[in-house]
Amino acid sequence: MNLPSHRSHLFLTELILDLFIFIVCASICASLFLYAQHLEQNSRELTDAVYLAETAAEQYRSGQFVSETNTTEDGISFCISTQEIPAGYGVSAAQVSVLCDGNVVYSLIVKTCEGGGLHG
Amino acid sequence: METISDHGKNNIHGAAVLVLCAIFFIFSIGIVLFGCHIYRSVVYASDQNYTQRTALSFLVNKARSGDTVDGIWLEQFGDGDAVVLREDGSTYQTRLYCCNGFLCELYCEPDAGLLPEDGSIILPLASLTARREGSLLHLTVQEKDGSVYEVSLCHRCGFDEEVAS
C-alpha cells in the first residue's frame, strides 16, 4: 500500500467534507439573514400602512371619502380603500383597508357621529 | 521509490486541495459580505422605522392631548413651523418644532422670551411642516437622509381661528 498517496486521499476527503459542512452552515445563515430582511420589510410595510390608514380614518372623520393609491418613501405602492359599513342610528362608519399587491396589510373601522360630533 | 505516475497523482491531489481551499475562501468571503449587506440594510430600515414611528406617534399624541377648544394652533418659531398646544385653564404653552436638526419641545409662558435653542431635544429630525386644511392638521416630518413621512389628524374641537397662521 502506498502510504503518502493514501494520506493525500484522506486529506482530500476531509477537505471535501469540511467544505460540504461549511456550505450547509452558510446556507442556513444566509436563509436566516434573508428571513430577517423579510421581517424588516414586513415591519416597514405595516408601519407605513398603519399611518396611511390612520390618515384616511381622520380624513373620513373630517368629511372626506378617501380611496387612493399612495406610494411611500420605500417605493411600496399601497392602495387605500374606504368602504362605508352599516352602523347605528346617527352614526356613520367605514372600514379603511390598506392593501399592498392585493393583500390587506392593515385595516381599521372608523365611526363618526353624523351630527358633527366625532367618536373613536 | 516514487514513479512518474505517482508524481502526476500527487500533482493532481495538490491542485485539488488548492481548488477546494480557493472555493472555501470564496464562499467565506461571500457569506461575510452578504451578511454585512443584509445587516446594514436591516439596521438602516430599523432606524428609519424607529424615527417614523417615534416622531409621528409623539406629534400625534401631543396634538391629541391638546385637542381642546382653542387648544392648538400653528405658528412660525425660529426658522420653521411650530405646533403650539395650550392646556385648559393654563397660560403655559407647549411648542413642538424643529431646530438645528432636532425635534424639540418647549414648555413655557408665551412671553417668556425663550429661543428655539432653549427647547428640550426629542430626537434627530431635519424638518417639521404643519398645515391646516379645514379641521385636518397635516404633519410632515423629514429625516436627515431626506425621507419624508406624514400623518393627518382631525381636530375635534376646532382650531384657534384668531392666532392660527
Image (cartoon, grey):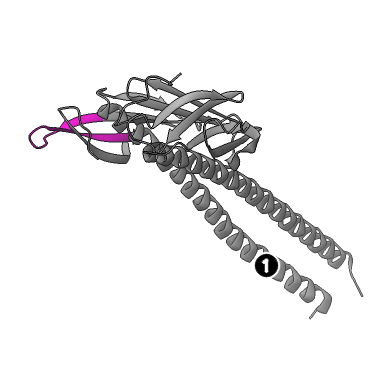
In terms of secondary structure, what is the magenta stretch mainly? strand
**Residue A84 vs residue A34: left or right?**
left
Q: Which residues are magenta?
A: A82-98
Above/below status of A37 relative to A98: below
* Occupied quadrant, residue B91: top left
Q: Residue at x 73, y 74 (%)?
A: A10
Residue position for label 1? A18
Please tell me how crowded label 1 is: few (under 14), some (14-19), or many (20+) other residues with Cα within 10 Å: some
Relative to the observer, which residue lies in front, B82 or B9? B82
In the image, residue B71 lies at what x, y percent?
38, 32
**Residue B18 vs residue A35: left or right?**
right
Task: Quadrant for the N terminus of chain A, please.
Answer: bottom right
Relative to the observer, which residue lies in front, A106 or A111? A111
In the image, residue B111 lies at what x, y percent?
55, 30
**Residue B90 vs residue A1: left or right?**
left
Mark 1 secondary-structure assignment: helix
Chain under callout 1: A
